[in-house]
Image (cartoon, rainbow, N blue to C red):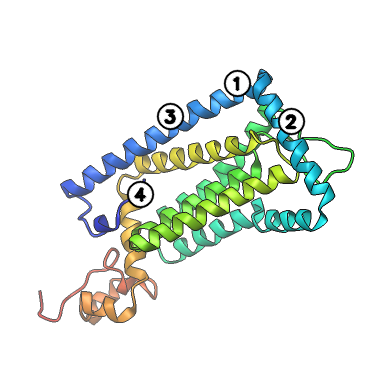
Amino acid sequence: MYPPIDGIHAAPGSASAAARRRQRLLVCSALVLGSAVLLGGLAALVASHWSPLARFDRRAVDLLHGYAVRHTIWTAAMQTLGDIGSTVTMRALLGLAALWLWAIGARTLGGWAGALILTGWLAGQLGKEGMGRDRPHFAAQATQADGHSFPSGHALASAVSCAALVILVWPRANRAGRAVACTVAGLAVLAVGWTRVALGADWPSDVPAGWLTAALVVGAVTLAVELWRPGALSQDVRRVDWRTRPRIQRVLAVGPITAPDLEQTTGPDRADDPLTAPTRRADGQ
């Protein structure tokens, strides 16, 4: 969805940059359309109480809840894992990333991350109120959960945050780093979703609904930002790349900045940023 590492330094107005932007628009559009269709289909099956899905949900929840009630250590472990991957924790992680991006001048990328948090929360609330699906109920609850269950809020928040963090890491990582990031994010999302079903807080079909809602949110927000500010996300990726280099590499890459150049900048770090400040190389060019 986001620019590959070999495209970070492409000129903003070049043909390759335009081609990559068109590719991102197509990928985001396909993601939005595909996730919306699948989510709509799943919601229709749940709303119509389709018997095969209803039986599967009921049997799976009864089986897992019974195991949780009989094994307190297992239940405590699932509750701890669920707390670690709670909606508050996941949104806080992405919120910290958004604040850091904003602080280093990557305002569009930071706003994108912030918009994912707000849009994900709003989509989850609208889905829950629209479907009005009650959570599983037992005489002895393994955990407490309020509100409606479809889509799963934990699954939605974890998928949005993990996907966004992987997207932010992707341009800066090599192949091994990308594989590690995707594996860790995928396991985290699966683990959070599993805890909600294992504890009887959500129906099994609520969890994929949360993941599909997350895909819809990430695709829609990214598409909106790309259409609103063409090329701004890619420019911020280059800015993050520049700001996170060791300082010695930045000095060697740009060369010394003269006093007149520094007078044209605003802020303590802008003189080091080739996207915001003019520079003059040692050879005078």
Query: Which amino acid lies under the numbered mark 1 shown in the image of this protein?
Result: Ala
* Relative depth, front residue between 36 and 185: 185
Quadrant location, the C terminus:
bottom left
Which of disc 1 and disc 2 is earlier in sequence? 1
Q: Nearer the viewer, mark 2 or mark 4?
A: 2
What residue would you read off at disc 4? 2
Secondary structure under the numbered disc 4 in the rendered image: loop
Badge 4 crowding class, 10 Å Cα cut-off, few under 14, some 14 to 19, many 20 or more, is: many
How far separated are the C-alphas under marks 3 and 4?
18 Å
Label 3 SS: helix
Q: Give neighbour class at mark 1: few <14, some 14-19, many 20+ (Cα, 10 Å).
A: few
Q: Which dot marks residue 33?
A: 3
Q: Which dot, 2 or 1, sits closer to the camera?
A: 2
Residue located 57% across and 50% down the image? 189
Instruction: Report the residue marked by disc 2.
Output: 58
Q: State the image coordinates of residue 117 (x, y, percent, origin top left).
A: 56, 48
Nearest-to-viewer mark from 2 and 3:
2
